[in-house]
Image (tube, grey):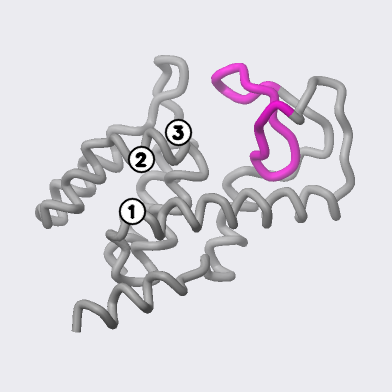
Amino acid sequence: MEAEVILIESQMRVSASLVEKLKEMEGLHLEAYLDATGVPTIGYGHTGRDVRMGDRISKYWAEDLLQRDLRAVEEGVRALGVAKTQGQFDALVSFAFNVGLLRLSTSSLLKRIRDGDSRESIVREFMRWVYADGKRLKGLERRRAWEAERFFE
């Protein structure tokens, strides 16, 4: 039975509803801007060395960047080996897309999931990640609440 779960997980992809939710949460920005932590960002939350202030892109390019970014995050979340349902996979991809795979992979959230902790404990861990540059953000509160709910669907 365990082998079946691993096989299914290795084939998991983000759901269409997650892609739409990410678009809603990230918003579309066709011109580079500084996010809440001062990182140059463009499109639907794309960051990296290829983003510079003053850059402009089309909606088509924003969609392409989102798909590329999601493929990388999907691979990283699959490698963690903890997502057993589509809801768990979507929640962890959303979380890692926002905070980064390294932070997810070293987080107490992941430890609690691996340890099979209670729903309350895991939700509490999601909700610890609502700060950017030391400031509590309503947008991150809403995002973490959605991720925690999706994790248990």
Q: Earlier in the sequence, mark 2 or mark 1?
A: 1
Q: Is residue 84 above or below residue 46?
A: below
For the point 55% across and 19% down, which residue is it?
37
Q: Is residue 65 magenta?
A: no
Relative depth, front residue between 84 and 126: 84
The residue segment tinted magenta is: 34-49
In the rendered image, which quarter contains the C terminus? bottom left
Query: Disc 1 on helix, strand or loop?
Result: helix
Q: Is residue 115 above or below residue 17?
A: above
Residue identifier under label 3: 138
Query: Disc 2 on helix, strand or loop?
Result: helix
Circles 2 and 1 in contact, beta carbons < 8 Å: yes
Q: Tell me: 122 left or right of 148.
A: left
Residue identifier under label 1: 80
Answer with the quarter of the image where residue 30 lies: top right
Residue identifier under label 2: 104
Q: Give coordinates of residue 141: x percent, y percent.
A: 39, 38
- What amino acid is found at the position of numbered circle 3 in the picture? Lys
